[in-house]
Amino acid sequence: MVGYENLLAVVSHYGPPIKGFQSLRVKIIDMSSPVMQIVKETECPLCKDAIIQWIGFSEEGQLYTMDE
């Protein structure tokens, strides 16, 4: 989980691994409204047999992940 200004990004499992690839999804949520709105929900790709080491936003608001 990581935040940037009014955005919150949450990565979670959404299924079992398939052939060594993790099944992860990332939700980007706008926390500025009274009711949290999901801005984007998509897969979070990783390399085979990898785990997330870092997740963060750039200064411009671009979401990045790093796996190992």
Image (cartoon, grey):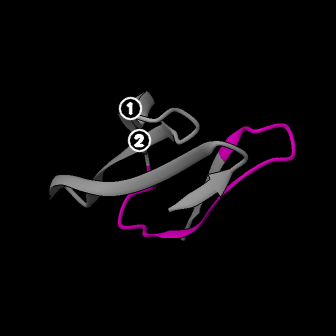
| Disc 1, SS | strand
Observer-nearest of 22 and 2: 2
Residue 60 locus on image (x, y percent): 85, 37
The residue indicated by pointer 2 is 27
- Amino acid identity at mark 2: Lys
| Disc 2, SS | strand
Q: In the figure, residue 53 lies in which quadrant? A: bottom right
Residue 52 locus on image (x, y percent): 49, 67
In the rendered structure, which segment of residues is drawn in magenta? 46-63
How far apart in space, not on screen, are marks 1 and 2 (Cα)? Answer: 4 Å
Magenta stretch encompasses residue 1:
no
Tell me which residue sits at (80%, 47%) in the image.
58
Mainly helix, strand or loop, the magenta region?
loop
Specify whether 59 is left or right of 22: right
Observer-nearest of 1 and 51: 1
Mark 1 Cα-neighbour bin, 10 Å: few <14, some 14–19, many ≥20: some
Tell me which residue sits at (52%, 32%) in the image.
33
The residue indicated by pointer 1 is 41
Tell me which residue sits at (43%, 69%) in the image.
51
Give the residue furthest to the front: 34
Query: Quick one: label 1 or label 2, which is nearer the N terminus?
Result: 2
Mark 2 Cα-neighbour bin, 10 Å: few <14, some 14–19, many ≥20: some
